[in-house]
Image (cartoon, rainbow, N blue to C red):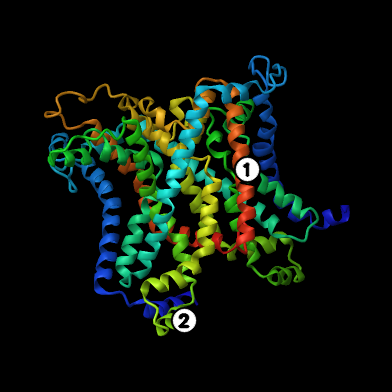
Amino acid sequence: MLKAITRHKFIYFMILPTFIYFLVFSYVPMVGIVIAFKDIQLFKGIWASPWVGLEHFRTFFGSIQFDRLMGNTLTISLSRIVFGFPIPILFALLLNEVRVGAFKKAVQTITYFPHFLSWVIFGGIIYNLLGPNGALNLILNLLGMEKIDFMTNPPIFRGMLIVTGILKEFGWGAIIYLAALSGIDGTLYEAARIDGAGKLRQIWHITLPGIRSTIVLMFVLSLAGIMDAGMEQILILANPLVYSTSDIIDTYVYRIGLQESNFGLATAVGLFKGVIGTVLIVLGNMIVRRTGERSIW
Amino acid sequence: MVAKSMEKRSRSLDNNPLWAKTLIYLILTALSLITLLPMVNVIAFSFSEARAIYDNPLMLLPHDFTTAAYTYIFSTPALLKAFGITVYVTLAGTLLNLLFTVTGAYGLSKTHIPGHRFLLWWTIIPMLFGAGLIPFYLLLKELHLINSLWAMILPGLVAPFNLILMRNFFWSIPDELEECVKIDGATEWTALTRIILPLSKPAIATIALFYAVGHWNDYFNGLFFLTDNGKWPLQVLLRSIIIDMSALNMRGTNLGQDVTKVVLTPENIKSATIVFSVVPILVVYPFLQRYFVKGIMMGAVKG
């Protein structure tokens, strides 16, 4: 054993920094989860603070916040999947029909771009567009219609989150499907055409089966991420007026943890979310393995 | 090979009726315009006079062209400082990201060493389970890194996705190549620096861009771990400008007065700041498009 280690010492040496990094910044915080079971008094330190058992979890599950946070998190995530998941696929299918190279390139260049903008920047652009004096409300005004409170009306705000989220990422999301589409054997289409299959039948029998494993993989990944409802976007666009429909678990942890220093409760809520996320991703990987030939990791 | 099959497919697929073709082009044009026009509008705002913005909020070209907003932001110390911090964090951060990720991936690509599976799981587990924001925050606090620029560099120093991407790339390099050099008497270090790394340039460029864009756009770490607003990076400052203009400390300018008389309004300044922080992304965009697409493909091949 020792001999093997000395023989490969260069390889171990190379991996050492990464090993230590994960030790300090991933595993040490896992030990810090004990905070979720303690009443943290910072002047005493983490270890000397008294244990409170499941107190924080009881507080969270019993609070009126719980239903609202879970409801918002799941509603926003599921809406993003229901409306946002098919769009990159349809977009890729449309783009795949374009034969004019320059047009295709231009569409890709434009629609990929927002992916590279931070939510701060994109949020600024959204404000500009949808704010009370934004372009869209001006157009509505010119058409003689009433203004829409995108930023302060709770139900409309939530819809706005979904739509702008899709707008930012649909182009980029299509790339993986375009890659899968380009891997389909062209002779299959030729054969289908000779057999008299029309356009839609070709899509149904060749195109979709050809990208099925990619669709399954992406779908499972998005379901596994269902507890992540888009904090980056919400921390930019939301305000207290729309908390009722847009406050999610992540924003709540940030607010009570970092802004109100309620470390115990915030850690407990974060742990609750983390455990569900882990279960989902492990389950997801099992499903992908069973249906397809690959594994997420 | 891909190009050839695409050519074949394009011949076999090109059988859409005219109405379908028209519809496809119309939908794609509409989607592109929906994405493009709001950005063009912001650019036009940033070069227009306040009065003109007020009169033509739908403009796509500047009205009453002025660069006053840019003159203003370039003379605002808070903004310039934030810009400098972002540049510093992006450069230093990406360099460290690369150092850790490339060495780690090289180590993980050698599957024959004892303990390989343990080391692999050591890096996969953090991808599956994270302790959450608060324990991480308390760790940084314990290490006295709150309000230090390290707090913007250390989180996500090794991104598991990039680690796996890089490892897969190392796998694609034939082992024989390394063995050959070693037989000639070269050390492992020489083999790595002279043979492996030069061959890996495209993959390293890809993950470097992934990391750099991540740093440039990051506002979470700044928001969470830097309470001293003198240390804020551009994105965090921009966030507070968008939410509340007072962050720029507007005293001394003629903002907020009668909109018909002044040259500058929050609209100009917000727009100019947005454009200002997008320019670097725009400059590297051609590379981003090429390498990011390549990276996604590499990741998609086998994870």
Q: Nearer the viewer, residue B150 or A138?
A: A138
Residue at the spot x=51%, y=62% of the render? B297
Disc 2: which residue: A187
Foreground: A25 or B296? B296
Point 46% across, 62% down: residue: A177
Chain letter of mark 1 equals: A
Quadrant position of the C terminus of chain B in the picture: bottom right
Tell me: B235 left or right of A293.
left
| Residue A278: assigned label | 1
Q: Amino acid at mark 2?
A: Thr
Relative horizontal placement of residue A101, taking residue B115 as reference (left or right) = left
Specify the amino acid type for callout 1.
Answer: Thr
Residue B301 visible in the snapshot: yes
Crowding near the residue tagged with mark 2, few <14, some 14–19, many ≥20 C-alpha atoms within 10 Å: few
Label 2: element kind: helix
Helix, strand or loop at disc 1?
helix
Q: Position of residue A57 (x, y in %)?
A: 62, 25
Above/below status of B293 relative to A246: below
Displayed quadrant of residue A62: top right
